[in-house]
């Protein structure tokens, strides 16, 4: 029998320790999405100014303001990022899938928000796919694939 590759699954407790608040989740996602520093999601420029308001950046090329959420599945959501990560954890680790009701209970958000997040997520993924058909969006493909890879396991169950 072939040996399964060893994959360490975090416990819920470890996850909570890793992401006790929004900022810890922002820092984590920043490291994944922008390993070489912030990149403008609008024009892919690396000429970025950090704004006084925490976690906000301005592109010096196209002058647009953005955050780590801009142009990701998190963009339209008001749910704190650490709750998002927890939701993804639940979605990925649940054997029989996760309902919006279960998510709302676990995250302390309304079922409507949980429902909205799940459908926003699908809509954003669809939008991302459409965008990726335009030339010059290869960087974006790589950027969003980090997120979509995790969320896509939800549909398997
Ligand atoms: Zn820009």
Image (spheres, rainbow, N blue to C red):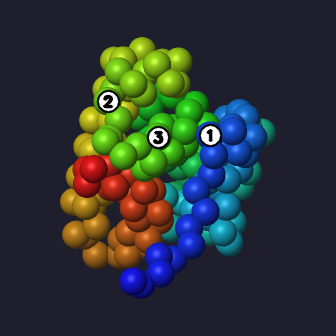
Per the image, label 3 sits on a secondary structure element best described as helix
Position of residue 4 measured from the top left corner of the image (x, y, whole percent): 47, 76
* Circle 1 residues within 10 Å: few <14, some 14–19, many ≥20: few
Reading the image, the residue beneath label 2 is 99
- Regarding residue 55, the answer to whether it shows in the image is no
Q: Is mark 2 within 8 Å of ligand 1?
A: no
Answer with mark 3 or mark 2, whichever residue precedes in sequence: 3
Between the C-alphas of marks 3 and 2, the distance is 10 Å
Q: Which of the 4 image quarters holds residue 20? A: top right
* Residue at 44% in and 71% down: 142
Q: Quick check: marks 1 and 2 in contact, CB under 8 Å?
A: no
Q: Which mark is residue 149?
A: none
Per the image, label 2 sits on a secondary structure element best described as loop
Reading the image, the residue beneath label 3 is 90
Between the C-alphas of marks 1 and 2, the distance is 18 Å
Position of residue 125 measured from the top left corner of the image (x, y, whole percent): 30, 52
Position of residue 58 measured from the top left corner of the image (x, y, whole percent): 63, 50
Quadrant where the N terminus lies? bottom left
Q: Which of the 4 image quarters holds residue 86? A: top right
Answer with mark 1 or mark 2, whichever residue precedes in sequence: 1
* Circle 3 residues within 10 Å: few <14, some 14–19, many ≥20: some
Q: Nearer the viewer, residue 40 or 98?
A: 98
* Residue at 69% in and 39% down: 13
Outermost residue toward the bottom in this view: 2
């Amino acid at each position: 029998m072939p040996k399964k590759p060893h994959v360490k699954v975090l416990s819920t407790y470890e996850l909570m320790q890793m992401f006790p608040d929004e900022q810890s989740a922002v820092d984590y996602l920043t490291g994944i999405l922008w390993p070489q520093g912030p990149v403008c999601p609008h024009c892919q420029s690396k000429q970025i100014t950090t704004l006084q308001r925490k976690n906000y950046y301005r592109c010096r090329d196209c002058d647009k303001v953005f955050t780590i959420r801009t142009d990701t599945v998190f963009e339209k959501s008001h749910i704190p990022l650490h709750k998002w990560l927890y939701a993804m954890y639940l979605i990925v680790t649940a054997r029989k899938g996760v309902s919006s009701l279960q998510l709302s209970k676990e995250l302390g958000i309304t079922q409507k928000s949980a429902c909205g997040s799940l459908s926003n997520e699908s809509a954003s993924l669809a939008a991302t796919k459409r965008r990726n058909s335009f030339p010059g969006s290869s960087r974006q493909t790589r950027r969003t694939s980090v997120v979509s890879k995790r969320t896509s396991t939800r549909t398997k169950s």
